Image (tube, rainbow, N blue to C red):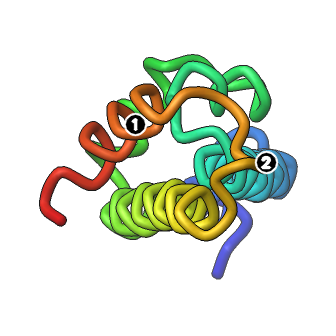
Amino acid sequence: MSREDNFKAEGPYGEGRAALNEERKRESAHRKALFLKAYEQWGTVLKSCELADVARKTVKNWLSTDTEFAQDLEEAKMSFGERLEMIGLDRLENPAAGKGTDLLLIAYLNANMAAK
């Protein structure tokens, strides 16, 4: 490949642009992982965005362009819902040790596990 062909293939910034793109991909993957982990814990987009330091608009963009992220978010939602179920089961087994209100727990379960 001639120098001119190489320039056309890589653009005027050459390898620096490729390295920057790779860094952006790594950072995006890291932010997605942080967001998903936070969602499993908190179950809300707002809190997850805050903890992952991303905008809600960014998450919407990921959902529309990255099918793997969308599937991973569905799994995180299921994990959060299952955690709520475990809290409910624990309250059934240990009613005196329960914290919070049962009504609030029911509302969360209905919102997050309506299919069950």
Q: Residues within 10 Å of mark 2 (few under 14, many from 20)?
A: few
Nearer the observer, 115 or 70? 115
**Direction from residue 106 to residue 90 in the image, left or right:** right
Residue at point 42% right, 43% down?
A: 62
- Residues at discs 1 and 2 in contact (Cβ within 8 Å): no
Nearer the observer, 96 or 112? 96
Q: Residues within 10 Å of mark 1 (few under 14, many from 20)?
A: some
Point out the image quarter for the N terminus: bottom right
**Direction from residue 115 to residue 41 in the image, left or right:** right
Residue 29 at x, y percent in the picture:
69, 57
- Asked if residue 103 can be seen in this view, the reply is yes
Give the amino acid at mark 1. Tyr
Q: Quadrant of residue 35?
A: top right
Q: Earlier in the sequence, mark 1 or mark 2?
A: 2
Nearest to viewer (mark 1 / mark 2): 1
Helix, strand or loop for disc 2: helix
Give the residue furthest to the front.
96
Residue bearing the label numbered 2:
27
**Direction from residue 107 to residue 94 in the image, left or right:** right
Residue bearing the label numbered 1:
108
